[in-house]
Image (cartoon, grey):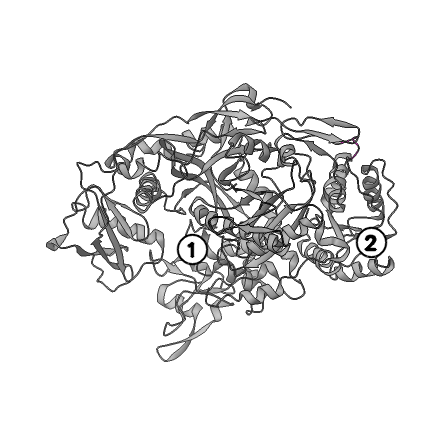
Amino acid sequence: MANIIDVNVKTNSFLVTRINLYAPSSCGSNFLAAFKPDITIVNKRERALHLLQTSVAPNLFHPRGVYDGKRLLYLSHKLKLPGGGGAASFTVRLGNDPDAPVGDPGVFQVLISKTASEIIRPADLNALMSVQGQTIDRKAATAMNLLQLLIRQSAHQNNPTNNGRAYFSSTGKKTLPGGIELWRGFFQSVRPNIGRMIVTIDTSMAAVYESGLLHEVAMNVLGARNPRELTLADERDPNFRKLQVHFKNRLIKTRTTGDKTKTIHAIVPGPIGRYTFQKEGSTTTIQDHFRAAYNITLQHPGTFGVRISGRSAPFPVIVPAELCKVIPGQLYKKRLPSSVTSTVVDFATQRPQDRLRTITHGTSAGVQSPIQGYHTSEFLSDAGMEIGMNPITLKAKLLPHPRMEFKGSELTPENGSWNVVNRRFASPKPLNSWAVVNFDARRINRGTVDKVINGLKSAFDAMDVPNPPQVLDGDGHAPAKTLDAIGRATGGNIEMIIVLLPAKADEIRNRVKYWGDVEHGIKTSCLREDKIQRANNQYWNNVAISQLNARLGGHYALPKTMVLAELQSAPFMIFGADVAHPGPGVSRPSIASVVFSWNIPATSYIAYSEVQAPRLEIIENLQAMVKKAILAFTKLSPPPQRIVFYRDGVSEGEMETVKTIEITAIKNACIEVWDEKKVPSRLDSRGNKEYQLPLPKVTFISVAKRHHTIFLPDDDRVDDRKTGNCKAGLAVDKLRSPLALDFYLQSHAAIKGTSRSGHYSILLDEIFNYNVSKIQQLSFELCHVYAKATRSISIPAPMVCARAKFHFDPNQLDFDAATNTSGSEEFDLAYWKRAYQPISTNSHHDKSMYFL
């Protein structure tokens, strides 16, 4: 086993060199801000507070306070409100008319009232930065919230398109098909470390709704070339639904309402020019109305219109699309179409050194980085807060790769990858009965099908793989019918069906997977036409490894490990758990999944998944899922004595709750199994059960991938010169959080762009006694056991949340289309639980790695 190498790395974090937080000589104060009528849009609330402090009462609010966009306004000085009381009301006009009376649209009363909160002082943060493993109390949380606002305030005021944590600019934007734009920007966050406070800055990207003339944007949404395609005769027109989903609730300005912002409440089918309504006792058309009232002649009277009045309005206010402009900078929060994925990746991808240069100097298109503006920020200056301009340099470690053992040979991975061509599988599984179904006969002819068969047979090395007894062309409109025919022809004796699909065939794939995973318990492997056409030996080897041998239960190689080998001295289980949540405005359940190892090398896993309430991060039924897993494990091995549990997707704010609830659930599951297995026990001196066979020791580790900390080589020994990243195996434990014993592990090598590490927080460790080095090495070793990969992966243990859609009958429910943006209907969890079908137990399909 190679030795650990000490290296130096740079990070995208900057040291906070001074924090006064409204020094003791000052008298800071906190106020509540309320609006009448209420303002629901965050940017609009921020604009109202900005005008209050700069135009309405600039002398009173000097220096300006920082506003959290919700309720709180922090000031560094005592605020003497008019009247001498604890509250005062101010009139703020968001429009251009300085004389507009209260009650008119855009005119608001802003009520400022004193809170009972104590003054925020640096001491509130000092305790937080001094001890590890503590929780953030109320005063420290308030101080941290203030720090976040201070570093973001100036940039967000100058860049109103922001999501609270990052801001974005249209400079250098890219337009996508479908009425969407990509904007570049910057993320910034201040975080406590042991003994210091740091600011992390990263590049960011956002999708926004395309701005411009509404009818032109609509043409891009539909892929139309001529405005005549925008007629939309009635609501049954498929294009009507597309435009309704895309434009509903979008903000616009019209030629007839000047600078006032309006909201699209609905799309109105065309020809909009002929739309009639009553005016002054007679019937007129929209076309005639706009000509008479505004001297506007419609250029495209045959297209659609929009309704900008609410349902409760006395009459509908409808404006032709050509007279509307979509306001720029409206964030697109839905999932982007899969057809633009490669474009999005190319837009967001930067080499590490280019990314750091952007972070320190701004984008090449001229978008300023936060670090460039901190020294001129009046808010930071007022708070006595200073931030260093140079990225922090850290000591780190480069961990050794485990050697990969094949049949008759072994190799040491190089920078997280290894080549298996011409190597014999360590534990191959025979493929005795298989078939091929071609759902793209127009592009994939019989010669190409033979190429698939021969490529797969050759990739299985010396294994005797028979020719498939069935090679059929399938009907993409009824995939199950073709698959049923194969089942009948083979008498149900089929292990694997190779499915050839068009390049874009998500619906067919969903139906194939439901048929195989849920209905029949037959493994399926889907290959896309565009991949097949340019396939080489490396491709067929990858398919044989990842989609065939692994799903059949074989392993092409076994890692020769160090810490994992120590665990093998007693029965142990490796768990991986995650919760996948629906996107904003999507009425779907969250999916909780658990995978666990059941063989000695921890290379084979079984998966369980369930639906639960939307956006609930706690795994609601974890105790039952872990119990089921341990019982399944004990059918193959003695009861586990050690459980290593990797929990994905937990934010720092949720960590304490997850720690309390989920660790208790795991331990209670163990007790249930021991009691069910009638393990002898007695009561100790405190009245607690003491089992003759001890309960498993538990190590619980939270792993976060969605963070913004990156590492760059500052040392030749860790420099992957090919990509400019740090090499795989980088472990960093010098950015210690006060919340938990933590470290970063970059276990894989990025093919392009900047590598992202996993952030590991050790919430409980009964196995290694909080030996961070051992947990780092174990985690890195487990990233080499993924049976379908010829590279080390980003985090230990596979996850199965992404396969949730395959558990729903596609004939009964379109999982991807199940949305409810209105939020008016109560979510029916019982319906989703009934619809979620378990994996078939036919031929032990549920105990195989079908999900790879």
Q: How many marks?
A: 2
User: Which of the pair 147/762 is nearer the observer?
Assistant: 762
Report x, y in % for residue 852. 68, 46
Q: Please tell me whether mark 1 or mark 2 is closer to you in this view.
A: 2
Is 422 included in the stretch rendered in magenta?
Answer: yes
Q: Specify the farthest residue to the left.
A: 83
Label number found at residue 494: 2
Q: Is residue 713 above or below residue 664?
A: above
Q: CA distance from mark 1 to mark 2?
A: 58 Å
In the displayed structure, does residue 577 sit left or right of residue 254?
right
Amino acid type at image mark 1: Lys
Q: Main secondary structure of the magenta part?
A: loop
- 656 or 162: nearer the eye? 656
- For the record, the magenta segment spans 421-425
For residue 336, say whether it is visible: no
Local secondary structure at mark 2: loop
> How crowded is the residue under tag 2: few (<14 C-alpha within 10 Å), some, or many (20+)?
some
Question: Which of the 4 quarters of the picture holds residue 430?
Answer: top right
Left or right, 525 with respect to 110, comes to right
> Disc number at residue 325?
1
Say whether residue 761 is magenta: no
Give percent across and percent down for residue 453.
Answer: 83, 44
Q: Is residue 293 above or below residue 807?
A: below
Q: Residues within 10 Å of mark 1 (few under 14, many from 20)?
A: some
What residue type is disc 2 on? Ile
**Tag 1 secondary structure:** strand
Q: Residue at x 24, y 49 (%)?
A: 117
In the image, residue 430 sits, relative to residue 426, either above or below, namely: below
x and y percentages locating residue 3 in the rendered image: 60, 21
In the picture as drawn, the residue positioned furthest to the bottom comes out as 281
Q: Point out residue 470 in the picture as x, y percentages from the top left corner.
A: 86, 53
Residue 708, numbered circle:
none
